[in-house]
Image (cartoon, rainbow, N blue to C red):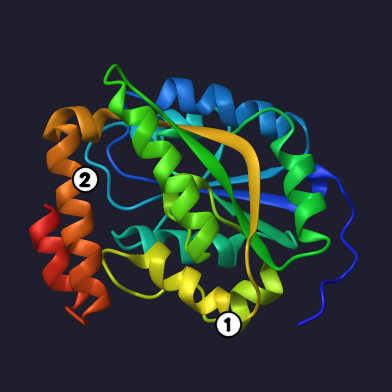
């Protein structure tokens, strides 16, 4: 599928953010997103049934908030459908984009169908630096991206592959597999920063073991619904 000519401007880009009970960390996220909105990006937050004040906080800050069925895949698909831009970027609520992310994404999508950023994991354990480096290397070699790497894609390609699969886990892996049938990803050296809180809460080594076990089971055909139960 040939890439169309895409202007290297923020006005071409929509940022879709799924959220659920993010009130504690939402102020910092909204400040971050306000900067991209000021540059001309369309920003849509999609709530999956928060029981805290997330929706009210985001709307009070002037952001567009959609309500969708719970589940990152469903929320991100709903956000993508509601956006009016030619380029889509999916950002987790605990991830922050690097400077000039809009320009590098637009430039990348002018020649490739999709891509992702390298990732830096914030946190105290030094092992998180190693984890991030291995994630980036593995992704570069395999062409598989994770949601923490802020996947971006041309709308026409996203719609052609059916968007995110309706499953509770590994939706980023499955989307990558679908997109790989179109092209290899643009693997940007610029880094997003994502929170290492889940690694610290569960333990770095335990989290590594869990993620590899889940990925291996998924490649063997274990349904994502069963894996989601193990992940919780």
C-alpha distance separating marks 1 and 2: 28 Å
Left of 96 or right of it: where is 42?
right
Camera-side mark, 1 or 2: 2
> In the current view of this chain or complex, which residue is farthest to the top?
124
Quarter of the figure that contains the N terminus: bottom right
Locate residue 94: give its quadrant.
Answer: top left
For disc 1, the marked residue is 181
Determine whether the residue tagged by mark 1 lies in a helix, strand or loop: loop
Rendered residue at 41%/59% (across/down): 75
Query: Would you say residue 123 is visible in this rendering?
Result: yes
Q: Position of residue 19 (x, y in %)?
A: 37, 44
Label located before the other in sequence (1 or 2): 1
Left of 189 or right of it: where is 209?
left
Q: Position of residue 29 (x, y in %)?
A: 48, 28
Rendered residue at 32%/65% (across/down): 170
Locate residue 115: give its quadrant.
Answer: bottom right
The numbered dot on residue 208 is: 2
């Amino acid at each position: 599928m040939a890439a169309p000519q895409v202007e290297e401007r923020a006005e071409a880009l929509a940022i879709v953010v799924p959220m659920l009970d993010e009130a504690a960390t939402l102020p910092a996220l909204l400040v971050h997103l306000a900067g991209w909105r000021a540059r001309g990006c369309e920003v849509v937050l999609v709530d999956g049934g928060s029981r805290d004040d997330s929706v009210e906080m985001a709307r009070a800050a002037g952001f567009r908030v959609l309500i969708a069925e719970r589940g990152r895949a469903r929320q991100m698909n709903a956000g993508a459908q509601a956006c009016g831009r030619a380029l889509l970027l999916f950002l987790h609520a605990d991830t922050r984009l690097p400077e000039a992310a809009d320009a590098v994404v637009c430039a990348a999508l002018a020649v490739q169908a999709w891509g992702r950023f390298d990732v830096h994991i914030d946190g105290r354990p030094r092992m998180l630096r190693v984890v991030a480096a291995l994630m980036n290397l593995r992704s570069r070699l395999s062409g598989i991206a994770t949601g923490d790497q802020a996947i971006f894609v041309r709308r026409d390609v996203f719609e052609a592959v059916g968007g995110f699969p309706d499953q509770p886990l590994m939706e980023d892996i499955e989307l990558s597999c679908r997109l790989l049938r179109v092209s290899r990803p643009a693997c940007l050296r610029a880094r997003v920063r994502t929170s290492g809180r889940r690694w610290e809460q569960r333990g770095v080594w335990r989290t590594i073991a869990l993620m590899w076990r889940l990925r291996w089971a998924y490649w063997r055909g274990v349904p994502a619904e069963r894996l989601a139960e193990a992940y919780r």
